[in-house]
């Protein structure tokens, strides 16, 4: 059981790291602010989500587990909010040449 | 090479690269973002050094608060940035500044590398006397019992910084509302975010403050979180900053350091030394100082970010 959980942790964290990598590549390569934001939110939501999911079996129930999930939810909330605000500012500023 | 060592080396290289980039980049705003990233990386270093108290402070003050202050400064400087760029210092000045900075870095590096092995430390003495202070977190014991004077001066320094910011006010606006004001759409996402986040953030801030007695945390970190929540509510248009001439504001700003000084002076009469706590009363006195300092710190930090008075007070 222990080894199965460890393998689950490794796989999920690696999948999370992949989304962070993809998000970073997108941030560097995409042409305009809106598409770059799109790439970033993938890293925030899925990347962090998978890392947290992978770490859950390693935490101590209940406090640490709840704290980790809460961190992911807060990152989701603030990521979504900041994404909206930046997108609005970018649209107001107009397309960059 | 172990995995942990690889992570440490990678982290160090990243920090050095980030520091270099912060100095080298021309655009002020980009430099500020570099500095904030640098602060967050430094937080990870403190975690790796098993110093979560310092890491929390670095994340809250070094990355968060200083970052917010610098972003505000960069935004204000934007209109004059092109003009300043034409009057860059000459190559001689820049070379001399570079040599001076390198010399300071080299001197620090030599000092650290020449420390005797093991490095001199007071940690065992601090841990041994922890029981006398009544607090469980040795860092809090250092801050409020062994080195209380330093903490008092820190609290006074941020207050002086706030006075410095206020003194930039135009004569006409003196005593008025701070510069920060909400431009948020009343039905927008920021208002929703502030409504959801601020209550949770306030609980987290008070928790971080309270838990500082026994675990990593404390008043500076907690105050930064509370100040951030207040500014979030102000930015969303849900709360107002007071004009700087308000009497209750002035009283709360002064009460923290005053209580701290008073307890320190009473110690010199009752316990024989300034900031000595009478036997058995250390914990309640430390708690009294922390509780008195908390509103002062929250107000000071929030108003530092809010900027100089700019709008007239209501007549």
Image (tube, coloured by chain):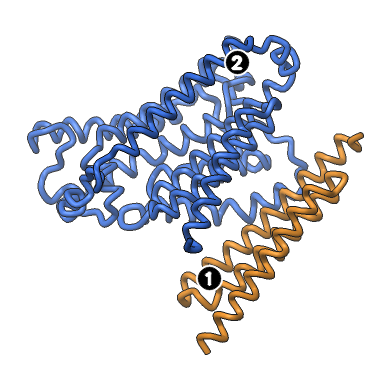
Chain colours: A orange, B blue
Chain at numbered mark 2: B
Q: Residue furthest bottom?
A: A1
Chain at numbered mark 1: A
User: Regarding mark 1 in the picture, which secondary structure is present there?
Assistant: helix
The residue at which mark 1 appears reads as A66
Q: Residue furthest front?
A: B1
Give coordinates of residue B158: x percent, y percent: 42, 29
**Residue plotted at (55% across, 42% down):** B15
Q: Is residue B38 above or below residue B159?
A: below
Classify residue A77 as left or right of residue B289. Answer: right
Classify residue B89 as left or right of residue B218. Answer: right
User: Image quadrant for the C terminus of chain B?
Assistant: top right
**Residue plotted at (9% across, 38% down):** B271
Q: Is residue A90 above or below residue A50?
A: above
The numbered mark at residue B173 is: 2
Give coordinates of residue B230: x percent, y percent: 56, 42
Give the quadrant of residue B250: top left
Name the front one of labels 2 and 1: 1
Give the quadrant of residue B63: top right
Give the quadrant of residue B82: top right
User: Regarding mark 2 in the picture, which secondary structure is present there?
Assistant: helix
Q: Is residue B190 above or below residue A55?
A: above
Give coordinates of residue B53: x percent, y percent: 39, 50
Q: Nearer the viewer, residue B64 or B247?
A: B64
**Residue plotted at (89% across, 36% down):** A96
Q: How far is disc 2 from disc 1 in space, using C-alphas?
A: 48 Å
């Amino acid at each position: 059981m222990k080894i199965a959980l460890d393998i689950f942790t490794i796989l999920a964290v690696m999948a999370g790291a992949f989304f962070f990598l993809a998000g970073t590549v997108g941030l560097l390569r995409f042409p305009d602010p809106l598409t770059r934001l799109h790439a970033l939110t993938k890293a925030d939501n899925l990347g962090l989500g998978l890392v947290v999911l992978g770490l859950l079996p390693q935490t101590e129930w209940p406090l640490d587990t709840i704290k980790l999930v809460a961190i992911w939810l807060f990152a989701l909330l603030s990521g979504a909010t900041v994404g909206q605000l930046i997108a609005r500012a970018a649209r107001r500023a107009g397309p960059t040449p | 090479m172990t995995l942990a060592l690889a992570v440490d080396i990678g982290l160090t290289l990243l920090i050095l690269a980030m520091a270099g980039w912060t100095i080298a980049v021309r655009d002020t705003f980009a430099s500020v973002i570099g500095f904030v990233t640098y602060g967050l990386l430094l937080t990870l270093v403190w975690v790796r050094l098993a110093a979560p108290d310092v890491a929390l402070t670095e994340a809250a003050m070094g990355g968060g608060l200083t970052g917010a202050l610098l972003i505000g400064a960069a935004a204000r400087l934007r209109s004059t940035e092109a003009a300043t760029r034409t009057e860059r210092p000459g190559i001689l000045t820049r070379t001399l500044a570079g040599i001076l900075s390198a010399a300071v870095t080299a001197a620090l590096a030599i000092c650290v590398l020449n420390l005797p092995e093991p490095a001199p430390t007071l940690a065992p003495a601090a841990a041994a006397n922890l029981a006398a202070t009544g607090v469980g977190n040795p860092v809090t014991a250092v801050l409020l019992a062994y080195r209380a004077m330093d903490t008092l001066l820190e609290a006074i320094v941020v207050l002086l910084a706030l006075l410095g910011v206020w003194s930039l006010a135009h004569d006409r606006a003196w005593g008025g509302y701070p510069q920060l004001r909400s431009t948020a759409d009343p039905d927008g996402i920021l208002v929703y975010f502030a409504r959801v986040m601020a209550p949770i953030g306030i609980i987290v801030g008070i928790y971080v403050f309270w838990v500082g007695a026994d675990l990593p945390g404390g008043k500076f970190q907690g105050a930064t979180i509370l100040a951030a929540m207040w500014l979030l509510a102000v930015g969303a248009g849900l709360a107002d900053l007071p004009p700087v001439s308000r009497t209750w504001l002035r009283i709360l700003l002064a009460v923290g350091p005053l209580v701290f000084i008073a307890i320190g002076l009473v110690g010199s009469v009752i316990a024989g030394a300034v900031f000595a706590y009478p036997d058995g009363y250390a914990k309640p006195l430390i708690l009294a100082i922390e509780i008195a300092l908390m509103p002062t710190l929250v107000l000071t930090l929030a108003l530092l970010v809010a900027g100089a008075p700019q709008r007239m007070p209501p007549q």
